[in-house]
Structures are given as structure tokens and as C-alpha cells.
């Protein structure tokens, strides 16, 4: 999501915000395509340094396995696809920032969990459904008040208009009875207030997850990104991002059920 704000249309007061860009890469890193071009490399996995702390047991389990599997190093910000001791594919990734966001009595830690997971499902052209933390973070970063919207509970605005949830969209109803629906993927900001749509409505942002995703459960994914500059960085809210070529390769070659070792 970008920090800048696009001008509001007419007198509606609606501020339209495209997704925020992730932090720029601090140093150059080889692309997934160039890394993959070397083909399988026997013994590469054995040469990787051992993961400290919570990731150590996961790394040891990954080393003991001879199955087709995906390895993810949070510290090195790299991913490998491995069969036995042969590395079939490798790519740079972006991982969680590790920061904590607090809003009211709720808190979220944006870290990539060191754990053993598996690919539960795969999807092309995924649509991101922003969780509550997205709105809490955006409001905090922008100095806005966050107000949840609910079905059957219109939000009255100072100019006499109101916001209503109608079907799966949010409608801005003007005092004269005129109405406009707020498009998917656009934030609803009037003055200094950000309105959060309920789950199941306009919380859909096409393109934010890139062309493909591999679901790891509990909201964690391997997915693409339009923010290529974030690859190689601790820049995500916990998911593992890859560039277009890398995520397309995983989508084609990694079956559902494949174990994923994150250490």
C-alpha cells in the first residue's frame, strides 16, 4: 500500500488508496530465475548454516527427510525446493518484519513462524482479503480514527450523508438520496476517519498476492507480490513473498501436500 493518497472524486469525501509499497531492498540480490538456471545442485542443503533457537529442530527434521520438500530460511531470506539431497530450485524471498502492532486491546506480531507446515491448497489469481490488522495499521500510520462498519448500522457523516453495507459492498448515500458504491480494493476515508468494512464485503484486493499462492494454513501463504523491491527483505506481515517467476515455478511444480520446513 502506498503512503500517498489519491485525490477524492467530487464531493463524496472518499479517499482512494492503492496498496502500500513495501520497503525498498537494501542490497541487490540474485533473481529466482538466475538462481534456478543452475539446475539441481547436490549437497547444497548440507552446506547451509544451522538455524538457531526455535528453528533448530525444524532444520534438523528437514535434514533427516528424504522426501520432496520446500525449505525456507527466515534469517537468510531464501527458499529451496529439495528432493533427497538435491536442490531442484532456489529463490530469494521476503519474510515477516517481526514488529508488533497494537490497537486498543488487540495486538499482532508480524513474524514468519518457524514451523513445519504443508501446502494445503494452490490458487491462481488470488484475491487478498485484508484482516483487521490492515485497517489498524493504516489508521495508525495515517493518524486516522478507525471505525468498524456493520450490517444494519449506518455510519452518519458530518455532511448528512451516511455509509451503509449493502450486499457485499459499501454504499455512500448522499443527503439527496443519490448513492455510489465504493469499489473493491479502495479504502473508505472521510475526513480523518477510516471505516473498516465487515468480513465478507468489500474486503477484497485483487493483485496484492501476485499471480499465485500456496496456502500453508492459519493465514500464512507462499505468494507473489507486485512489490518486487521487497524481495530479500523482512517486509511482510508473516507470509513468504516471491517474485513472479519463482511463485509461478512453485505453483507448477510443488504438489498439494508437500511439506514446508520454515526455520
Image: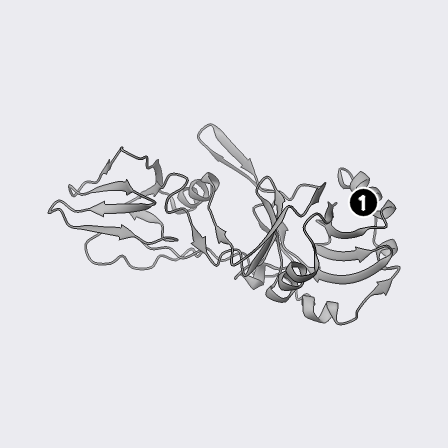
Q: Position of residue 31 (x, y in %)?
A: 67, 68
Q: How many marks?
A: 1
Q: Which residue occupies the extreme top position in the image?
A: 105
Q: What secondary structure is marked by label 1?
A: helix
Q: Quadrant of residue 103?
A: top left
- Residue 144 is drawn in which quadrant? top left
In the rendered view, would you say 92 is above or below 129?
A: below
Q: Would residue 201 be found to the left or right of residue 40 on screen?
A: left
Q: x, y (%) of residue 53? A: 77, 38
Q: Is residue 13 visible?
A: no
Visual colour scheme: one colour
Quarter holding the N terminus is bottom left
**Residue at the spot x=83%, y=51% of the render?**
49
Q: Residue at x 37, y 55 (%)?
A: 17
Q: Nearer the viewer, residue 82 or 25?
A: 82
The structure residue drawn at horizontal position 89% and vertical position 59%, both measured from the top left corner, is 43
Q: Look at the image and tell me in which quarter the C terminus lies.
A: top right
Residue occupying the far left of the picture: 176
Pointer 1: what residue? 59
Report x, y in % for residue 175. Answer: 13, 44
Is 112 in front, or is 193?
A: 112
Near mark 1 (Cα within 10 A), the count class, few <14, some 14-19 or many ≥20, is: many
Q: Is residue 254 visible?
A: yes
Q: Is residue 231 left or right of residue 157?
A: right
Residue plotted at (81% across, 39% down) = 57
Left or right of residue 68, residue 134 in this image: left
Amino acid at each position: 500500500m502506498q503512503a500517498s493518497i489519491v485525490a477524492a472524486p467530487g464531493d463524496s469525501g472518499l479517499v482512494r488508496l492503492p496498496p502500500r509499497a513495501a520497503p525498498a531492498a537494501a542490497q541487490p540480490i540474485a533473481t529466482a530465475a538466475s538462481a534456478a538456471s543452475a539446475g539441481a545442485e547436490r549437497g547444497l542443503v548440507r552446506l547451509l548454516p544451522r538455524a538457531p533457537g526455535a528453528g533448530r529442530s525444524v532444520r534438523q527434521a528437514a535434514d533427516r527427510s528424504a522426501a520432496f520438500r520446500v525449505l525456507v530460511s527466515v534469517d537468510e531470506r531464501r527458499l529451496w525446493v529439495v528432493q533427497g539431497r538435491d536442490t531442484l530450485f532456489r529463490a530469494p524471498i521476503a519474510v515477516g518484519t517481526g514488529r508488533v502492532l497494537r490497537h486498543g486491546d488487540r495486538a499482532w506480531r508480524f513474524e514468519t513462524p518457524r514451523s513445519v507446515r504443508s501446502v494445503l491448497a494452490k490458487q491462481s489469481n488470488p484475491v487478498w482479503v485484508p484482516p483487521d490488522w490492515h485497517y489498524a495499521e493504516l489508521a495508525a500510520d495515517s493518524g486516522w480514527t478507525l471505525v468498524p462498519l456493520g450490517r444494519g448500522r449506518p455510519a452518519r457523516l458530518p455532511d448528512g450523508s451516511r455509509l451503509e453495507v449493502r450486499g457485499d459492498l459499501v454504499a455512500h448515500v448522499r443527503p439527496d438520496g443519490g448513492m455510489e458504491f465504493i469499489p473493491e480494493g479502495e479504502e473508505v476515508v472521510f475526513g480523518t476517519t477510516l471505516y473498516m468494512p465487515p468480513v465478507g464485503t468489500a474486503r477484497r484486493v485483487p493483485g496484492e498476492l501476485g499471480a499465485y499462492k500456496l496456502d500453508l494454513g492459519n493465514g500464512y501463504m507462499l505468494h507473489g507480490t507486485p512489490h518486487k523491491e521487497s524481495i530479500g527483505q523482512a517486509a511482510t506481515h508473516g507470509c513468504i513473498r516471491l517474485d513472479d517467476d519463482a511463485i509461478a515455478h512453485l505453483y507448477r511444480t510443488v504438489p498439494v501436500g508437500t511439506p514446508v520446513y520454515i526455520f
